[in-house]
Image: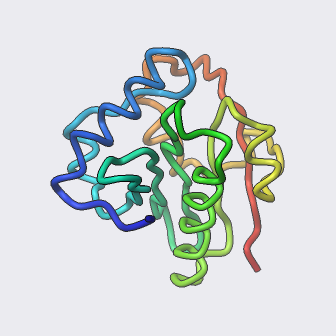
Amino acid sequence: MLKKASVEDIKQIHGIINSAASKGEMLPRSLGELYDNMRDYFVYVDDGRIVGTGALHICWEDLAEVRSICVVASHRMKGIGRKIVDATLEEAKSYKIRHVFLLTYQTDFFKKCGFHVTDKENLPQKIWSDCIKCPKFPKCDETAMKIELF
């Protein structure tokens, strides 16, 4: 079952994201950052346990970022990640946000979701306000991808 995240979900979201980050699959998120942005997150629950998460973070009037798409290893290849991505894109459409981007190591997955590779230089300066806090800045090794919703 897919739902918006609640305060009670944050510690499980933190565990899922940081477990994947420890394997180099994504960047880590702090508990503080997750609580600050809780309303951005979706979770996928299976048998009472969160097995997937992802977020839509609004950056500007017509720009949002898909963040932290992650499914636990035991539940991958079951369409859960796609459901989470689709939910973030539907939410962006509901806010009339046309441009959605992400930074990822999983380009093949996001291509299947309709995103295409773009140059990081094409992304507005607003984005770099988050990147400057990243431990990999300025040598980002993630791929920038973008989708136009309408």
**Seen from this angle, which residue lies furthest left?**
8
Q: Quadrant of residue 30?
A: top left
The answer to whether residue 50 is left or right of residue 85 is: left
Above/below status of 100 relative to 132? below
**Rendering coords of residue 35 (x, y %):** 21, 49
Q: Please report the residue visible at 23 percent of the width from the left and 61 percent of the height from the top.
A: 6
Above/below status of 116 relative to 6? above
Q: Please report the residue visible at 61 percent of the width from the left and 23 percent of the height from the top.
A: 140
**Which image quarter holds the C terminus?**
bottom right
The answer to whether residue 109 is left or right of residue 57 is: right
The answer to whether residue 116 is left or right of residue 19 is: right
Above/below status of 56 relative to 102? below
Number of numbered labels in the structure image: 0
Q: Closer to the camera, 146 or 73? A: 73
Q: Please report the residue visible at 60 percent of the width from the left and 61 percent of the height from the top.
A: 83
Q: Closer to the camera, 72 or 10? A: 72
**Rendering coords of residue 99 (x, y %):** 67, 66
Above/below status of 89 relative to 52? below
Q: Please report the residue visible at 44 percent of the width from the left and 42 percent of the height from the top.
A: 129
**Rendering coords of residue 37 (x, y %):** 30, 54
Q: Quadrant of residue 75?
A: top right
**Which image quarter holds the N terminus?**
bottom left
Colour mode of the rendering:
rainbow
